Image (cartoon, rainbow, N blue to C red):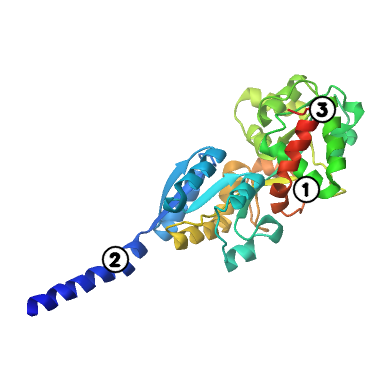
Amino acid sequence: MKHRWAFRLLGLFIAALWVSGVPAEEKVLNLYSARHYQTDEALYSEFTQRTGITIRRIEGKEDELLERIRNEGANSPADVLLTVDAARLSAAHEMGLFAPVKSAVLERRIPAHLRTGDWFSFSMRARVIIYAKGAVRPEELRTYADLADPRLRGKVCSRSASHPYNLSLLASIIAHEGEARAEQWARGVVANLARSPRGGDTDQIRAVSAGECAVALANTYYLARMMRSEKAEDRKVIERIAVVWPDQQGNGAHVNVSGGGVLKTAPHREAAVKFLEYLASDEAQRYFADGNNEWPVVAGVKVANPALEALGKFKADSLPVGSLGTYRAKAQIIFDRVGYR
């Protein structure tokens, strides 16, 4: 009888450990990240020091990570997905990968237009117009619409229209002005191309500097990276070009974001929410700005980045970031229809 009671008590003890002890005590966060920036290492180290939560990270390309999470299904170990571009974050939402998150910290610190019900922006980059000094007059480039003006025939360089940066820009134009105006703009840009679209944003900046074209679009963090570069050739590129903040009298410059959300099947949900809240802290926001040349999304954060300071203040478009995903498919259809590859 005594042995029977002893075994019964032992079984209850083991069950209690299994239900309430082991999983809850595991201080781990499984992060799937499409951000490939070395400076993010400081973010992760700081979070671990603050919380004692170890980050186990898998990095990959955006679409590959989305497909991996979907294929893993309910057995996915992923707690948080971080990626670049609002349309990609919206794609994760549409695939049903994110779980809704209610956090007073995130709602207080991140502006409403830079978050949705299940994913949040943590840094911004603006899409600006780059032009060659002396090749065009800056007053001819006050808006994105000016890129479609026949005065720029044969003077515009571009990366592929199918890249998310350009798709998100056109999605914002659709949201503000409708599909007809957006298609008119896309046709005008195609007519003004100096060459077939190719390369990345840095390649467009170099092409403008080299005189291959006079005008291009680029995200600001590529530009700021070159401004801070110690390479002589990068400094020469910057000396030959200038920047225009588009649409400052209208909707403001188009901004895209880096962001993330908690996965629906996250095994460490509490740690995942803590991580998102940490990314909205002043310290993490400064890492985004000073380390990777992105603007903080939290107002009033003091940064010490000479390139961002040199670029100056600007009016940003306040279009809700979820809209960029809403109109992404239509943007691709328009680009295909006008032959913008």
The label nearer to you, 1 versus 3, is: 3
Residue 314, label in figure = 1
Residue 321 picture location, percent across and down = 70, 52
Position of 327 with respect to 293 (left or right) is right
Q: Nearer the viewer, residue 16 or 37?
A: 16
The answer to whether residue 39 is seen in the rendering is no
Q: Residue 144 location in percent, x, y?
A: 83, 39
SS state under label 1: loop
Mark 3 residue element: helix
Instruction: Specify the amino acid type for callout 2.
Output: Trp
Mark 2 or mark 3, which is nearer the start of the sequence?
A: 2
CA separation in Å, label 2 and label 1: 54 Å
Total tally of numbered discs in the picture: 3
Mark sitting earlier along the chain (1/3): 3
- At x 69% / y 48%, what residue is drawn? 325
Q: Position of residue 250 (x, y in %)?
A: 86, 49
Indicate which disc residue 18 carries. Answer: 2
Residue type, numbered disc 1: Phe
Q: Is residue 294 left or right of residue 274?
A: right
Q: Is the residue 50 above or below the residue 305 in the image? A: below
User: How far apart are labels 3 and 2 at the CA level?
Assistant: 62 Å
Density class for disc 1 (Cα within 10 Å; few <14, some 14-19, many ≥20) is few
Q: Image quadrant of residue 167?
A: top right
Q: Which residue is mark 3?
A: 190
Name the residue at 66% across, 29% down: 200
Q: Earlier in the sequence, mark 2 or mark 1?
A: 2
- Which residue is at a point 79% across and 32% down the rendered structure image? 337
Q: Answer whether residue 188 is visible to the viewer in this image.
A: yes
Q: Nearer the viewer, residue 34 or 211?
A: 34
Quadrant of image for the C terminus: top right
Find numbered disc 2 in the image and state the secondary structure of the residue it sits on: helix
**Rounded to the nearest whole Å, what is the CA distance between mark 1 and mark 3?**
28 Å
